Image: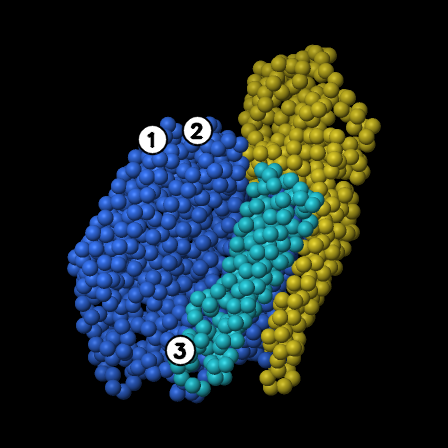
Amino acid sequence: MTSPPGGHDSQKVSQFERTWSSPSGIAGLLSAVNYQPLAKRYMVISFAFMILSGIMALLIRVQLAVSENDFLGPEVYNQLFTMHGSVMLYVFAVPFLEGLSLYLIPPMIGSRDVAFPRLTAFSFWTYFFGSLVFISSFAFGTAPDAGWFAYTPLSTARYSGISLDFWVLGLGLIEIGGIAAGAEIVVTVLKLRAPGMALDRMPIFAWAVLAAGIMILFAFTTLLTATLLLELDRSINTRFFDAERGGSSLLWQHLFWFFGHPEVYIIFLPAAGIVSMVVGTFARRIVAYRLIVVAIVLMAFVSFGLWVHHMYTTGLPELSMYFFAAASLMVSIASGMQVFAWIGSLWGRRPQLTTPLLYVLGFLFIFVLGGMTGVMVALVPFDLQVHDTYFVVAHFHYVLIGGAVFPIMAGLYYWMPKFTGRMLSRRLGTWSFWLSFIGFNLTFFPMHVMGFFGLPRRVYTYPKELGLDEYNLISTAGAFILAGGFGAFAIDFLLSLRRPADAPNDPWGGDTLEWSIGSPTPSYTFDTPPIVRGRHPLWITDAKAADGEASVRAQAALTFAPSNWRATLSTDVLTGEPQAIQFLPGPSYLPFIAAVGLLVASIGILLKAYLLLPVGVVITAGALLRWLWPSEKVIRMLRESPVPGEAGLPVFLTGYRSTGWWGLLCLITVLGTFFAALFYAYFYIRLFSEQWPQDGLPRPDLLWPGFAILLLIASGGAFWASSKGHRDAHRGLFYGGLIGAVLLAVLFLGLHGFGLTQPTFGPQTNAYASLYYVIGGSLGLLVATGLVVLAAALVRSRRDFEDRGGFMTLQMQLTSYFWNFVVITGVVTFAVVNLSPYVI
Amino acid sequence: MRNHEILEAKAAGAVGRLALGVALLGAPLAWTIHFLLSWGIAEWSGLSGTLTNTILGVTSRAWLLIGVSIVAVAIGLASTFIAHWCVRRLKPLEADATGTAAWFVARTGVVNGYLFTFVVAVESLPIFYYLRDA
Amino acid sequence: MAWLSAIGACDCVGRRRTLVWLCALVVSISGCQGERIQSALHPASPASGAIAWLWWLIFGVTSAVFVFVMILALVAMLRRRGPDPDPPLGGTLFVVAGGIVMPSIILVGFLVASLNTSKTLQQPESDLTIEVVGHQYWWEVRYPDQAIVTANELHIPAGRPVRLELRSADVIHNFWVPQLHGKKDMLPERTNEFWITADQPGVYRGQCAEYCGLQHAWMAFYVVALSPDEFDEWVAERRKPTAEPPADSVLAQGRDVFFQHKCHTCHAIRGTAAEGVIGPDLTHLGSRLSIGAGVLPNTPGDLAGWIVNPQAIKPGNRMPRIYVEPNDLHALRAYLETLK
């Protein structure tokens, strides 16, 4: 597929290649939007952080090797265990898997790039800046020391210094990058699959990252909300987590673990997807495909019902804890199904024992053992003993290293030819595996026993009288052997880079599309869009006739084409029928600039130089506006291009067929989750308060806010009329409705803002007051954002009112969905903030 | 094997996307509703000490939770039934159509339906240990 | 063939190591009774006993499942019959049986076992209440009905359930004496109810189990279970009016040193003007088992060392370093030792 077939002149081919290449030098560094360089940077940087964090772990193990050791001292130790956990979970695991997914998904599903290339770049830069903020705390000598979970009140300003601001702000940026990448992966898997790749033909890895991507939208947003509340408590003295002023330290735990437990599955699902791919290739089959998909769905849902099993000792009602215990037990059925599917697939297939498969077998041993202890800690009474002891440390290292790092190593050995064009050494790979496997078990198995014998987590030392010196010494020795395993991999990797990039396209005989293209993958990924004829596209050798006419025509039209703009095929979510030619933007500095704006704002908060905050917001908002504003030139170019005509497919889609619709759905999910988390905080604090509003504060007004909310609803109606005006080509109705909607919304905003200046209390008065202002302020910001969206439609319409088949129609649809969301959020907010104090 | 696009079009004619969506995700949504309501009721009434009056020796909290569970199981079974219905609608199409995405989703919906309904049922079990206290 | 021997080797090593570990685990857990001062598997109370029983049950079942799954994986890799062999029952049914039916039965069983255990851990009736307040990094212990205040030690009557009221004065701490019960958080926003019982008289070590800051590692305490008579005696002893004027001049000097160095701003000694509440109550310091919440044994030398430089021994605790003349130090130490 790499050599141009006859009939394609070399000039067109080279123009096609040029169109897809990134600029070189600094320009390419900052403006590239292709998935390959960005995903590679994601992987390289996050892996480097893993090594750094691994070194911290070694220091931790040295400190703990013998009792009452003074190698590190409490201050450094607490910083190291905090940063070890934080870096592994926030800066390594999820970003690495997102990078891996971004790199593998386009070639695996037969697309030339991801759905929103500039969003990939934005995601990478925010992640990169966030990780810099995070790690720079070491350089300033104030590394965070409140644990990766940052429980309040230990993490509030009263008990922690600026180190926690590094933690919160770095994490905030990383989460934004993570959410962006999650949305990217979801829309790409749903919309950009090759023709013929119906839902039942999707590689299991794609199912897994699709589920993980959706989970990220909910889980990361909740954490982002929690960290926002924490930073408000820290910087402007709101009272969300301040027990003395009506706040609740448990609120943090609920919000944190609502993120924290799904997080484990967000890491595990893609890792299990890797295992399925490796097993599938080497066993040359995967049994019970449907059941694996069901297991993924089960995990994606039920993992959101486990979070309280981190809180069994906090004194919640026992019955309420048992719902979480039952869910925690049930979710292991999903693991069981996948384990048996892998064993069943391997059954009697006599696979070649390659390094990836070795790592998968090691994974099976470790993960199943970790799963067993996972079932144990789900049981309420048993957990009362082992909670926050080394038993739990052992358990989650078994599931995270066994369940994620071993599959990642398998994936690296498996897909390395696609990343670098080079195979890794089998000999060093075997060394790497055995060192890791033996070292891992030596390190972590004794920890189960240490937990039973009374060693709590997060202690910088322990008394000799606990009798744990031998266990700890074995564990420390094991840690160095484990590090040797990673060292062997690092040497293997570096040595491979010195060899020429001569890996074959398909060294393992794989079944999925990424093995049909060059190693490493070319910048355009596919010169000819593939057509998929079954679940294992590369193992199907016959049945050309089974290809649909539309697919064949689109394939022909897109071979080395279009040559002057980037495009891939967009297909139906369910059936994989080709629906459109998807335009993909080329290099741009805007994502980088938008991320820089966020960095500036974060630094402003960090240094308490609050003037930088608006500067950063303006930079980001400006870049985003410029980014989202459709380019006249591009639209004209797309309209004039002959390729859509040849392919028999449109370039503009509307409604749920378009990628924009799915992108907006992701955005609304994120915003909805944000408000849901705020409302949850409201009712949670309400539940613990004897008096509501607290401290005898007056109940909020009904009259004026009620009137304001009616204006907002009217604005929703006006926009509905405007949409109808656009559909019916009725200019009067369109402009009347749109201008009416804008004016009503402005009026609402004015009243709402005025209302927030009225109370006699401030946001620092107590937790109720903090909630009142933060929820009200969030609604104000949301409506203001909605106003910008409405105004954009108004401005656009002056040029494109007549465009009814494509871009303008899509803009009106998306504006309508967004504005409806704003209105509904406004009504719910009114019900929560203004009505509920009168009702309950 | 017939042209894939024609088969998919036939399958799409037999069952709508809404039915398929319900078949696939109805039971998971039933689980979600059950979980959130059960937890909310148990946590709120347990901490605030409400809903403790007993009817037939069982607290109204427990009655309420049992009611929520019954409704959730019913929703789960209903969506399983819809999944079965989709499978039946697709079966009479010529043999190849069983290879379509719609067929896959409907069959997956059946497994999902039973599994999630089972999970809901198991998660209701603790209620019977806490009929009188929290 | 190479792969076969590799797998064989892998299997032997893997299986043997597992066996060794399992043996080591069982032996070490059940073997050295008496040496384990903070072990969840050496229960000394009905609650810990019930939890340990649950552990041995689930440990047995999960071990069997683990071994079964590993054998299946091994057979899957080694089996070489037929060109295209399916797993037993065929692919789908194999997964249904092993991945859905088997875990469902076991997990529902575990849930029931767990619920039954929880029922036995219900808070029992009790006629003795102790309030425990967590501080960074020590334990304030109050007997409201007996008007006793002490620190870092709970004295309880053996064989009687004791009701605990747990809360925190600052960040979240966690009360854990593994041999007597599981854990319970101590929160700043509300009081958590908990209970312990000791079957036999003895000393049981406990430790803070929720990360609470710099010296989380050295926030330990002891539960001293006494026979009922001894406990009544202990209570009576503690309720006697204390702090009679020191009998000799060295002790009097020690008491003066105590006030000269402003120790009373943080510490209380009942019967004197010292009523500080920032640090532990010292009324019965002389009879305590440890200094600094478990960081040192309560010996004269260690006490002197602690007074001179607590920050060297437990960096980050709230007690400042104070310069005391050697002569004064001797007197102060002697005075504090008499507080029993």
Q: Amino acid at mark 3?
A: Ala
N-term mark: 1 or 2: 2
Chain bearing mark 2: A
**Chain for colour cyan:** B
Q: Amino acid at mark 1?
A: Gln
> Is disc 3 surrounded by few (<14), some (14 to 19) or many (20+) residues within 10 Å?
some
Tell me where residue B10 appears, x and y as whole percent. 42, 79
Tell me where residue A40 appears, x and y as whole percent. 38, 64
**Which residue appears at 20% of the width and 74% of the height?**
A641
Q: Is residue C298 above or below residue A383?
A: above
* Quarter of the figure that contains the N terminus of chain A: bottom left
Please name the residue that numbered disc 1 is placed on.
A758
Chain bearing mark 3: B
Q: Secondary structure at mark 3?
A: helix
Front residue of A74 and A516: A516
Please name the residue that numbered disc 2 is placed on.
A697
Q: Amino acid at mark 2?
A: Leu
The residue most toward the left is A799
Left or right position of C183 against B89:
right
For the question of whether residue C254 can be seen, the reply is: yes
Q: Is residue A14 above or below residue A274?
A: below
Front residue of C286 and A63: C286
Chain A painted colour:
blue
